[in-house]
Amino acid sequence: MTPADLVADCSATLQPLEAAANASWWDANVDASDETQHRRAEAEVALSDALADPEAFREIRAARSESGLDPLVARELDLLEQSFAPNQVDADVRREIVELQGDIESRFARHRGTIDGESVDDNGILRVLRTSDDTERRAEAWLASKTVGAEVAADVRKLVGLRNRAAHSLGYRDHFALTLATTDFDEDRLFATLAEVDDITARPFRTLKAELDEQLAHRFAVPVDALRPWHYDDPFFQDAPSSIGVDLDPHLHDADLEELTVRTFEAMGLDIRRVVARSDLAPRAGKVQHAFCIDVDRAGDVRVLSNNTAGARWAETMLHEFGHAAYFDGVGRDLPWLLRTMHLCLTEGVAMRCGRLVNDPEWLRRIAGVPAGTVDDLAPQLRAAGRAQLLIFARWVLVMTHFERGLYAQPDADHDNRWWELVERFQLVQRPDGRNAPDWAAKIHIAAAPVYYHNYLFGEMIASQLAASLGGLVESGDAGRALETRVFTPGATHRWDHLVEQATGSALTPAVFARELAS
């Protein structure tokens, strides 16, 4: 069998199994139930069983070593090896991982905290944290956001152990190392970049945080050293509060977020109406409370899940998620099936570039319809808001990435305490007095999207580099076509770092990102 024939056979086997797994995953997220979770687990195990085929894996590795391979076939073999390698483990372990992860995600979807004895969703918790001046009520809302952590923490630790057991059987240090090795990331390079970002952001973040804390201390009539996590607008302090940027909710409160998103991408020359029609965008019980985009079949079935309520937060989320959707939808359909995808940090880069539009004066004027005079008045605050968001989010990614590396390195360590050590170190947020709880486990990514958060930081750097090389997105209809040509259409024909350099004219570094923080 030639390498090309091997690729064709593997693709023919995997294509329907992946589509079935993706469709069942979607169903389990839009309607979390025992039935949808069971169907999801069975579909994911079937895909994992195919990827566990040891004979196919041996043939893939042998084919990769052949000389004179067609470049596209060589790239397909690389992607096949990265997909097959993590599945070369005991079938019982693979099934247990799939079932436990799915169960945890289903519990996240169904869980609701309580405030004043009443069930409340994440939107309700955020509403309290963003509007209330009552410290006791804010504290109750913050604690409500963490109750899911206590519910799932023991099982998340068990899941970490299972993932490590699988990684060890493959010769890797732990699951963290395995994930990086099979997603085109070098661990030394990653942490060197994180150290550089830490150095770039430490001083301006400290200054920004001090200014914010002075405002909050005045607002809540407490000393600065009495501020606690519930005094901030977000349960994890991963988003910039309006008090150090701009509150766009009054300007976007009456906006139709679906139509606003469609108009945004039309201004770029991109049509997303078909994706909107397939999507699920309203909050309801039993539905996962965050947002995501999924390409079900690599053939045009792209969908977005969101939980829209009026205001800037979900406007930004819609722009972000439909940035993913435009990318998925724009991948070259003439490419082989295996190459009709992209690296995670690349799609995050495009999504973040689109999400940033919510603070873009041109977008507010042309797309959101905010009066020009109002936008001119807001311009300094918009710049401050964009800069603050980059600083705050970068520090949050440092927490998540360092935490996960330590979690997999020592699963039985005191991670409840270590979490707060990292929060205090990188975010300068003081832990609640006497707090001893698995607050880390309330972050769904740790269970559902492990070793992923670094992609967001690299995505922010890619977004900055795309902005510097391609310019504004909504000024003309050329922006989307430029993204399609340079970024979307190539799919996964190149490694992510090679495609970034090809698309922007230079290798990815924190340099442009740093200039934005200094402006």
Image (cartoon, helix red, strand yellow):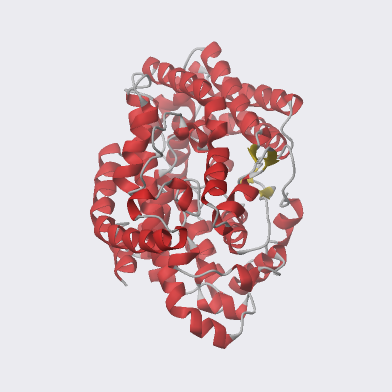
Q: Which is more toward the observer, 454 or 268? A: 454
- Image quarter where the C terminus lies is bottom left
Q: Up-down: is 202 above or below 78?
A: below
Q: Position of residue 219 (x, y in %)?
A: 46, 62
151 lies left or right of 430 = right
Q: Position of residue 469 (x, y in %)?
A: 39, 70
Q: Which is more toward the observer, 451 or 8? A: 451
Please tell me in which quadrant of the rendered image residue 260 appears: bottom right
Can residue 292 be seen here? no
Q: Residue at x 24, y 59 (%)?
A: 203
Q: Which is more toward the observer, 374 or 269? A: 374
Q: Residue at x 64, y 43 (%)?
A: 289
Q: How many marks?
A: 0
Q: Position of residue 1 (x, y in %)?
A: 51, 26
328 lies left or right of 233 = right
Q: Which is more toward the observer, 232 or 478? A: 232
Please tell me in which quadrant of the rendered image residue 121 appears: top right
Q: Give the residue at the far front of this rendering.
A: 221
Q: Position of residue 50 (x, y in %)?
A: 58, 22
Q: Up-down: is 475 above or below 297?
A: below
Can residue 45 be seen here? yes
Q: Give the residue at the far bottom of this rendering.
A: 373
